[in-house]
């Protein structure tokens, strides 16, 4: 008889999450009441933002409570339904949590057509990662053809899409990634004009070489020293898109702000934060555009799918903060 295996938050992590920050539990598979349906979760989306949800402080969503199932987006199959809008057998996307089964009232859940693309793609390029890249680049960054776009964490799930979208738009694209293999992949497989290794110790000099006329749009997923290096290379009127700050999420000393933020004034530049959910009413626009570019072969998808089931969750989550994944990190349950 199946059970509902879950990971719950047991303690607020200090630095990287440790084994004793999690509580593994097994409950009976829940039954859906009126107006609800039961989903068997098959794939979990692992995202850097999950680390911020573990903290008690104010954020764009409430923190995960101690003892609660860890928040996570996922793809699953409806197995039982008392909801008129969802039928058994449908594949659905939603915030189901780190568990094998979830009951939903349908709020925030979308039916996905896995005949168009594999399920993990709807967690990456055709899901949160692609939507974040699309609106962050085009609505916040507002690049013009011929301008230079620099993307940090460029080999990650958001960065790898952002860079390709900028190329589709006719921009020169420079990626910042960790290690020569990732940099080579960005150029040879995903069409970036150049990629620089932030671990090599020459980031400012490398950005000067590959963005000699300055950075027009900086799409930042990292923060910290990488953000400071980009600020030092801004072109007049540049736009910085604040999508994330993965270098800061596990800091035990508090976040590091850019010491040279006055470059925003010097270059008459702007720095704007955003969250993908700000554009919820426009998701269909983004997904239609992204799917079209995928069909045309202009946009390549990449998912790093880890198998082994829910027991692999704590270990797999850490891959994000060690820079071990390329593309979208997904855990197959």
Image (cartoon, rainbow, N blue to C red):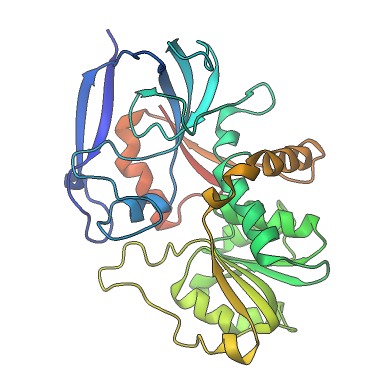
Q: Nearer the viewer, residue 33 or 166?
A: 33
Is residue 201 positioned above or below 18 on the image? Answer: below
Horizontally, residue 222 falls left or right of residue 267, namely left
| Quadrant the N terminus occupies | top left
Horizontally, residue 180 falls left or right of residue 215, namely left
Residue 292 can be seen in this image: yes
Is residue 298 positioned above or below 182 on the image? Answer: above
Q: Nearer the viewer, residue 303 or 51?
A: 51
| Quadrant the C terminus occupies | top left
- In this view, the residue farthest toward the bottom is 266
- In this view, the residue farthest toward the top is 1
x then y, percent, for residue 303: 56, 40
Q: Residue at x 67, y 21 (%)?
A: 115
Which quadrant would residue 237 be assigned to in this image?
bottom right
Horizontally, residue 291 falls left or right of residue 15, namely right
Which quadrant would residue 32 be assigned to in this image?
top left
x then y, percent, for residue 282: 65, 44
x then y, percent, for residue 312: 33, 35
x then y, percent, for residue 17: 26, 52
Q: Residue at x 50, y 10 (%)?
A: 88
Q: Residue at x 41, y 79 (%)?
A: 257
Residue 125 can be seen in this image: no
Horizontally, residue 222 falls left or right of residue 217, namely left
Q: Nearer the viewer, residue 221 or 311?
A: 221
């Amino acid at each position: 008889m199946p059970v509902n295996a879950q990971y719950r938050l047991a303690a607020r992590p200090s630095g990287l999450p440790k084994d004793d920050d999690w509580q593994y539990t097994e409950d009976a598979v829940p039954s859906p009441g009126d107006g609800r349906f039961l989903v068997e979760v098959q794939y979990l989306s692992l995202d850097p933002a999950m680390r911020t949800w573990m903290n008690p402080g104010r954020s764009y969503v409430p923190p995960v409570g101690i003892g609660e199932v860890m928040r996570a987006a996922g793809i699953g199959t409806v197995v039982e339904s008392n909801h008129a809008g969802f039928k058994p057998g449908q594949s659905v996307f939603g915030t189901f949590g780190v568990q094998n089964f979830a009951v939903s009232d349908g709020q925030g859940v979308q039916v996905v057509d896995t005949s168009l693309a594999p399920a993990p793609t709807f967690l990456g390029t055709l899901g949160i990662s692609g939507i974040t890249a699309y609106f962050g680049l085009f609505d916040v960054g507002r690049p013009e053809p011929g301008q230079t776009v620099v993307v940090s964490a460029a080999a990650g799930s958001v960065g790898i899409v952002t860079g390709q979208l900028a190329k589709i738009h006719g921009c020169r694209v420079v990626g910042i990634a960790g290690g020569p293999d990732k940099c080579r992949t960005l150029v040879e497989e995903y069409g970036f004009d150049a990629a620089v290794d932030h671990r090599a110790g020459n980031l400012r000099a490398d950005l000067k070489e590959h963005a000699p006329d300055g950075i027009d749009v900086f799409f930042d997923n990292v923060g910290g020293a990488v953000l400071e290096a980009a600020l030092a290379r801004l072109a007049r009127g540049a736009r910085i898109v604040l999508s994330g700050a993965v270098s800061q999420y596990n800091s035990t000393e508090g976040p590091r702000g850019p010491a040279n933020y006055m470059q925003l004034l010097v270059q008459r530049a702007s720095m704007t934060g955003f969250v993908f959910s700000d554009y919820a009413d426009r998701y269909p626009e983004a997904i239609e555009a992204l799917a079209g570019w995928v069909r045309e072969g202009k946009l390549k998808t990449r998912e790093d799918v880890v198998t082994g089931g829910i027991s692999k969750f704590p270990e797999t989550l850490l891959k994000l903060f060690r820079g071990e994944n390329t593309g979208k990190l997904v855990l197959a349950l």
